[in-house]
Amino acid sequence: MNSSDTARRLEALGNETRLEIFRTLVRAGHDGLPVGEIQSRTGTARSTLSHHLHKLIAVGLVRQERDGTTLYCHAVFDEMQATIDYLTRECCADARSNSCNAA
């Protein structure tokens, strides 16, 4: 994980609709959700949802898989964790005291 990848992911999540979509997928766990269910839960128009999902896929936070005629979306938990780890890896590294409350 590097600054560029992290910045792209944070930019994608900086959109309120994409953040809501991603959080919906995180709550769904490893089973993921069909696109129609994401649409229903978020109230996002289908064409708009497709646009936002493609952005999340492009930065590696979401993956899709087809099961018959149903398209499932899944949060990519390893990439989510890598992003969080990048942000917290050096927490308090330059602090004067040895205590860090962010961990």
Image (cartoon, helix red, strand yellow):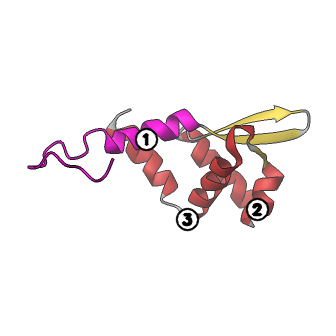
Where is mark 2, residue-wise?
41
On the image, the x and y values in percent for residue 38 come to: 75, 55
Residue at disc 3, secondary structure: helix
Q: At label 2, which amino acid type do we have?
A: Arg
Q: Name which of mark 3 and mark 1 comes first in the sequence.
A: 3
Q: Name which of mark 2 and mark 1 comes first in the sequence.
A: 2
Q: What segment is highlighted magenta in the picture?
A: 77-103
Which residue, as the protein is rendered here, is positioned at the far right? 68
> Is 87 a magenta residue?
yes
Where is mark 1, residue-wise?
83
Tag 2: Cα neighbours inside 10 Å, few (<14), some, or many (≥20)?
A: few
Q: For this view, does 64 lie left or right of residue 77?
A: right
Residue at disc 2, secondary structure: helix
Residue 65 visible, this orientation: yes
Where is mark 3, residue-wise?
16
Q: Which residue is located at x 66 percent, y 51 percent? A: 27
Q: For this view, does 45 lie left or right of residue 84?
A: right
Rendered image quadrant of residue 82: top left
On the image, the x and y values in percent for residue 72 come to: 78, 41
Q: Which residue is located at x 82 percent, y 34 percent? A: 66
